[in-house]
Image (cartoon, grey):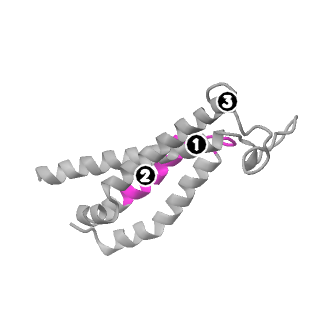
Amino acid sequence: MNMSSLVRTGAGILMPFLLVFGFYIVLHGHLTPGGGFQGGAVIATAFVLLMVAYSYEIIWERISLEFLKNTETLGLMLFILTALIALVAGLAFFGNWLLGAGGLFGTPVSYGINPGDLNTGGVIPILNIAVGLDVLGAMSVIILTMLFAVRRDA
């Protein structure tokens, strides 16, 4: 059963804002409270909003269970790969192999009081992205599975 057009329109308006806010939380997790789990939960909430606004069949067609499982697997593999690269680089497991490398996340932090920058997190932003993908996939799979069970019993 579809919800009213008001609910669907509201969901369509809120969806991009939830996605942007979720990705913001993931990417700024090393600077502010938040991170991969919290941001992934917000992004999964955006998908839940779509599930509430539209019928189960429409969501099932647009967001496949395989895609969500692959998203979860990608997050897990990125997390493990980040840890293993440190071993290959001769550091401890989960060692910060980007420290001082420059580039996207490898800029060293200056001493003293500083607000931090997005490019000073080393491997932590990569781990936040990995956890965000994992949480997004896992929470969405759980919710879709629960919705499938409710639809089957009805």
Can you say whether 53 is above or below 124 in the image? below
Can you say whether 61 is above or below 70 in the image? below
Closer to the camera in the image, 96 or 40: 96
Q: Could you tell me if residue 108 is visible in this image?
A: yes
Q: Residue at x 80, y 44 (%)?
A: 107
Q: Residues within 10 Å of mark 2 (few under 14, many from 20)?
A: many
Q: Residue at x 76, y 44 (%)?
A: 106
Quadrant placement of the N terminus? bottom left
Q: What is the quadrant of residue 84 in the picture?
A: top right
* Amino acid type shown at disc 3: Gly
Q: At which x and y percent is residue 154? A: 11, 53
**Sequence order check: which comes first, mark 1 or mark 3?**
3
Q: Which residues are magenta?
A: 29-49
* Amino acid type shown at disc 1: Asn
Contact (Cβ within 8 Å) of mark 1 with mark 2: no
Q: At which x and y percent is residue 89? A: 69, 32
Q: Which residue is mark 1?
A: 128
Q: Which residue is mark 3?
A: 95
Q: At which x and y percent is residue 57? A: 23, 64
Q: What is the quadrant of residue 126 in the picture?
A: top right
**Secondary structure of the magenta portion, mostly?**
helix
Q: At which x and y percent is residue 114? A: 83, 41
